[in-house]
Amino acid sequence: MANGGKTSLATNNGNGAADSRPIDLVFPLRIIAFIGATTITILGRLGGIWFLFQDTTYWLLLGVFRKKARIGRAAIISQMVRLGVRATTIVLLLSGCIGSILALQMQPPLADFGQVDKIANILSIAVLRELGPLMSAIILTGFAGAAIAAEVGTMVVGEEIEALEATALNPIRFLVVPRVIAAAVSTLCLTVFANIAAIAAGMAVTVYIHGVPAKLYWDNTVTQSQFGDLATGMVKGLIFGLLIGLIACYNGLKVTGGAAGVGRATTDTVVASIVSIIFADLFFTAMFFMLGWT
């Protein structure tokens, strides 16, 4: 018997009498509805970002091969300065702290085996493959992702996007392409700076605190590190920057609800970018592992 979303289940209690126990179906149905709605939302956003990527690639290739549709270099450079150059100091500082922390934390276990000099081997691989691009991307998410989403979202609220379309100017070409390129290139360059800062800080701690000779540390770093380690990290940095730019532009273009919508877009951009970066890192690490590039 169904009553108010509940179903009665009749059972025998051993004395021949029927025992009616209500089974609440509302809570399981709400869970299913929540999972379904969340899945649809995620797939919708992934589809929107994919179509934005296609449009961005189209206008980028058109700008490369057609003189009349060239992408403004001044716009790209100004975005790189605003998003990437201003983040250099904080990237160097935090990457240096990470390198120092790793050098300090690895000393006790390695000292038990008399292998303190191997800090250089572990640190170089960890930084070049993972920590360099990952730290750069997460830091740039706060600089580039939030700034792009807020800027584009404000343009949407102020109807500046509609003004561009009314004058036959494509918003993807003039707004999205320069910002996506700037985010990708900036993350790539910041990855290099992060690698240098982390390895140099780790070397300073290992040499001046743990007493490892500087030449031995440098020799271990050069011996352990290969071009593939640097290349895989650079590829990750480029992909991470591309994700940051696309997610930020997508959320900015989808702003509704005035100033409150701009705030939501900024928050969604930071959260979605970090989650996407972590999943992309896992995917590419697994792919490089299967290809034998690690």
Image (cartoon, rainbow, N blue to C red):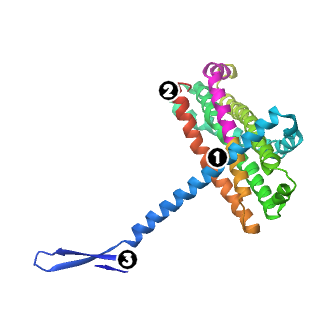
Q: Quadrant of the C terminus?
A: top right
Residue at image point 78% right, 46% down? 179
Q: Quadrant of residue 25?
A: bottom left
Q: What x and y, as percent, mark residue 192?
A: 73, 32
Closer to the chain start, of discs 2 and 3, is 3
Q: Which residue is mark 3?
A: 5
Closer to us: mark 2 or mark 3? Answer: 3
Mark 3, other Cα within 10 Å: few <14 / some 14–19 / many ≥20: few
Q: Amino acid at mark 2?
A: Phe
CB under 8 Å between callouts 2 and 3? no
Element under disc 2: loop
The label on residue 50 is: 1
The nearer-to-camera label among 1 and 2 is 1
* Magenta segment: 217-240
- Position of residue 246 relative to residue 199, above or below, is below
Residue 148: give x, y in percent of width and height.
77, 52
Decide if residue 265 is on the left or right side of residue 4: right
Q: Residue at x 63, y 30 (%)?
A: 232
State whether residue 269 is above or below residue 95: below
Percent x, y of residue 123: 61, 31
Kindly identify the amino acid type of the residue bearing the numbered disc 1: Trp
Principal SS element in the magenta part? Answer: helix
Give coordinates of residue 220: x percent, y percent. 62, 21
Going from N to C along the chain, the mark reached first, 1 or 2, is 1
Residue 209 in view here: no
Please name the residue that numbered disc 2 is placed on: 113
